[in-house]
Image (cartoon, coloured by chain):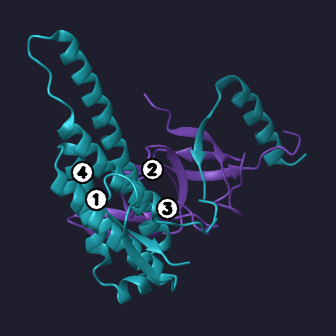
Chain colours: A cyan, B purple
Amino acid sequence: MGEKNVITGILDRMDERLEFDTAFAHCDFPCGIYDPHLAQLSALTVVRMVDLINNIPKPTASKPEEIMDYSHDIARAVEIKEKHAELCKHEVRIIWGDYIKPDHVKLHPDLHEIVWNIMKYGSKAKQEPDREAAMKLLNEVNRFAEIFWETKGIKTKRAKAPYEPREEIVYPQL
Amino acid sequence: MKSPVFVLKISGNSMRPFAMDGDYAISTRVFLRPRIGEVIILTSPNDGKMMIKRVKSVSRTDGEQRYFVEGDNRIRSTDSNTFGSIGRRDVIGKVLFISRKSKAR
């Protein structure tokens, strides 16, 4: 038995008793699956939540049950808005970090600024129920999607989503 | 007080062939600064978890040493190519040697 095996044997027994902490050496699996669709749907959801938040009927001050219902609905809509704004940022960061390469940026020099805007407007959309910020987020994500599909040589078209809030999103022409 | 030498179990294969999934990394906290080519334990800027990576380059930004780290077996290793260079405060330790996992385990 070599020296390393003796050490490993000792470490195995120590690990059973002490449970050593883990150092991660993970790679993302190179699945190659990238699609801005989830970011677009998330941005669209943010717009929809802003609309809902601004249209929930205000409660009557003297009716506690209405105040409770109102608070409940607002809380849920805000939570969904928060989650989708973050999901949108996350999805864009993944594509930007893992897929986008310097050659793409050479062809689209505004790409970094678009991503930066998505991060900024995504945060702004979380901070307040501001439709303008939510729409800026959606517009930048749409622009990001157009560039993404262009890097794949796939044409895109813009069309209004066939559901509320019926705002325009970019679809690949597959 | 934290021990100057510590042992971590490795999860994942981004450091193959230097270290493989299930190996032990015997590491030290006692060193001045990481050098290029050395394998270090760091705190991931992404999620705060401990990672093992190799120092590929060192730079100085605003008076602070920054370390660009990569996995040895990088296909799309989660490393400085994703989260950027790291500061000295993100470095937990330096790996002294790797003890291979037992085959029977």
Do the residues marked 4 and 3 share a common chain?
Answer: no
Dot 4 and dot 2 within a common chain:
no
Mark nearest the camera among 4 and 2 is 4
Q: Which residue is mark 2?
A: B44
Image quadrant in which the N terminus of chain A is located = top right
Residue mark closest to the camera, 1 vs 3: 1
| Chain at tag 4 | A
Q: Does dot 1 land on a helix, a strand or a loop?
A: helix
Residue A120 can be seen in this image:
no
Graded by Cα atoms within 10 Å as few (under 14), some (14 to 19) or many (20 or more), the crowding at tag 1 reads many
Residue designated by label 3: B79
Residue A103 lies in what quarter of the image? bottom left
| Residue occupying the point 66% across, 52% down | B12
Give the spatial CA distance, label 1 vs label 2. Answer: 20 Å
Q: CA distance from mark 1 to mark 3?
A: 21 Å
Amino acid type for the residue under numbered disc 2: Ser
